[in-house]
Amino acid sequence: MSIHDQNSLREQISILGKSLFDRGLTMGSSGNISVRLDDGGWLMTPTNACLGRLDPARISHLDEKGQLLGGDKPTKEQFLHMAMYAERPQSGAIVHLHSTHSVAVSCLPEIDQCDCIPPLTAYYVMRVGKLPLVPYHMPGDPKLGDAVRGLAGKHSAVLLANHGPVVAGKNLDAAVYATEELEETAKLYLLLRGQNPRGLTPEQVAELEAKFPRG
């Protein structure tokens, strides 16, 4: 990948990070974004960085082994990204947020841990699909990476209990759009609790999954 292309990706990460922050989908220094490079390395947001104020030049550049080549030290949740990428060679970008409604769903004791949010809309099925719950681990615990790795091969998104979503996409736009769709559907799910809402049928879900494969 040329320097020009890499710089363009850095700008894109910064622009989309600010968009997520400005709309309240992440706060403070929470959340992180990564993009897979053509040479097998990654660009990744730095540790303790606010997604609303990213400096493109300081975004971490990692080699194929995850070693820092340039920029600031990467997010301490680097291992979450690496675990997802290891199982998803088709994915080109990952977004991890502590978005309010998704985290709220992750705290509910009655949710289906194999599929945390029912298929309420077509776009949720198309962009997220089944969303398994990863049991609670202390932030930074390497065992969390192992738990994510065990699910990532079959799911493009997982929900960390009492923590937030980790979402992969074929490229950065797709990963961001899927994360936004997850958060909005989590909000819908919370609004509809106790209302016995009409979701999509298994046949409708299967039709969407066949026509719109996810990253």
Image (cartoon, grey):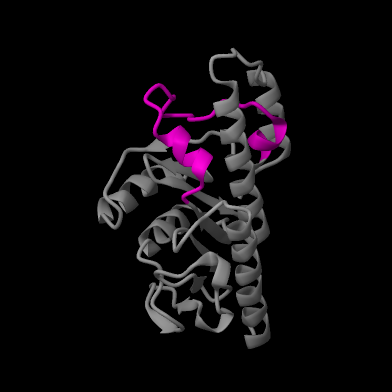
In the displayed structure, 10 sits above or below 170; it is: below
In the displayed structure, 107 sits above or below 63; it is: above
Residue 188 sits in quarter = top right
Side (left or right) of 76 relative to 9: left
Q: Position of residue 101 (x, y in %)?
A: 52, 39
Q: Position of residue 51 (x, y in %)?
A: 53, 65
Camera sees residue 171: no
Q: Position of residue 197 (x, y in %)?
A: 63, 16
Q: Residue at x 39, y 72 (%)?
A: 66
Residue 56 sits in quarter = bottom right
Q: Nearer the viewer, residue 190 or 8?
A: 190
Camera sees residue 160: yes
In the displayed structure, 60 sits above or below 191; it is: below
Q: Residue at x 30, y 41 (%)?
A: 136
Looking at the rendering, the stretch of residues picked out in magenta corresponds to 98-126
Work out which quarter of the rendered image holds the N terminus and state it: bottom right
Q: Nearer the viewer, residue 115 or 160?
A: 160
